[in-house]
């Protein structure tokens, strides 16, 4: 079994790769397999490992719950996106499903609108634990995460979304391999 830090690193690699593919535009061009969402799904599931590598305290307990809920929501969102991708050029069926999801709040909010953001929020709360000892990587995570969503959903800018994801993931990577502060012993 791989170590949690290795799983975290693999998760970051898969997650960023999915955003590289998302930033390129048309996912319907992926004829045989929807690689973007497979990488996103695998990456999100592996990012759950961050719950096991950071120090345990009250903040990390909240962060772990948010991260877990975000992973679950990413699984649901990717499932919806796999179904949407499977329609291929059938725009009518795709639009019907999209309309149905939009009219079903018990799917729309937990798996499309709010839920996936919890993964970014949970990892940002984990990063907040290090704001005093590792401020730059912490801020990369705390600021980068929201900008992934803002750049995609509000500004509809794939390049900014990718840049935000790279900043977010780089901050997590730096925190993952941070140097622990060891108190100096007086002799």
Image (tube, rainbow, N blue to C red):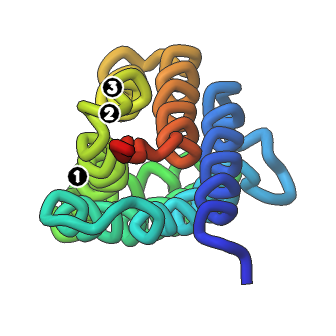
So how many labels did they put on this image? Answer: 3
**Residue at the location (26% across, 33% down)?**
131
Look at the numbered discs 2 and 1 and tell me whether their residues touch, using CB distance below 8 Å: no
Residue where numbered disc 1 is placed:
114
Of the image marks 1 and 3, the number of the one nearer the N terminus = 1
Q: Secondary structure at mark 3?
A: helix
> Compared to 21, does 92 lie above or below?
below
**Relative vertical location of residue 146 with respect to residue 82 in this rendering, above or below:** above
Mark 2 or 1, nearer chain start: 1
Q: Quadrant of the N terminus?
A: bottom right
Are the residues tagged 2 and 3 within 8 Å (C-beta)? Answer: yes
For the residue carrying disc 1, how many other residues have a C-alpha within 10 Å: few (<14), some (14-19), or many (20+)? few
Q: Nearer the viewer, residue 119 or 19?
A: 119
Residue 40 circle label: none
- Where does label 2 land, which residue? 133
To which residue does mark 3 refer? 135
> Where is residue 39 drawn, in percent x and y?
68, 55
32 or 22: nearer the viewer: 22
């Amino acid at each position: 079994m791989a170590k949690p830090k290795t799983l975290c690193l693999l998760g970051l690699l898969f997650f960023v790769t999915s955003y590289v593919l998302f930033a390129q535009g048309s996912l319907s061009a992926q004829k045989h397999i929807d690689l973007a969402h497979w990488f996103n799904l695998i990456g999100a599931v592996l990012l759950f490992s961050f719950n096991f590598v950071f120090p345990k305290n009250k903040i990390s307990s909240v962060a772990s719950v948010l991260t877990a809920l975000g992973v679950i929501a990413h699984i649901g969102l990717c499932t919806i996106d796999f179904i949407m991708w499977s329609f291929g050029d059938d725009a009518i069926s795709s639009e019907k499903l999209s309309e149905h999801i939009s009219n079903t709040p018990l799917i729309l909010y937990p798996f499309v609108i709010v839920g996936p953001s919890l993964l970014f929020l949970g990892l940002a709360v984990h990063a907040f634990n290090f704001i005093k000892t590792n401020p730059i990587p912490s801020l990369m995570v705390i600021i980068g995460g929201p900008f992934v969503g803002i750049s995609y959903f509000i500004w509809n800018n794939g390049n900014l979304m990718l840049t935000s994801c790279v900043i977010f993931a780089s901050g997590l990577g730096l925190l993952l391999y941070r140097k622990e502060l060891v108190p100096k012993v007086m002799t």
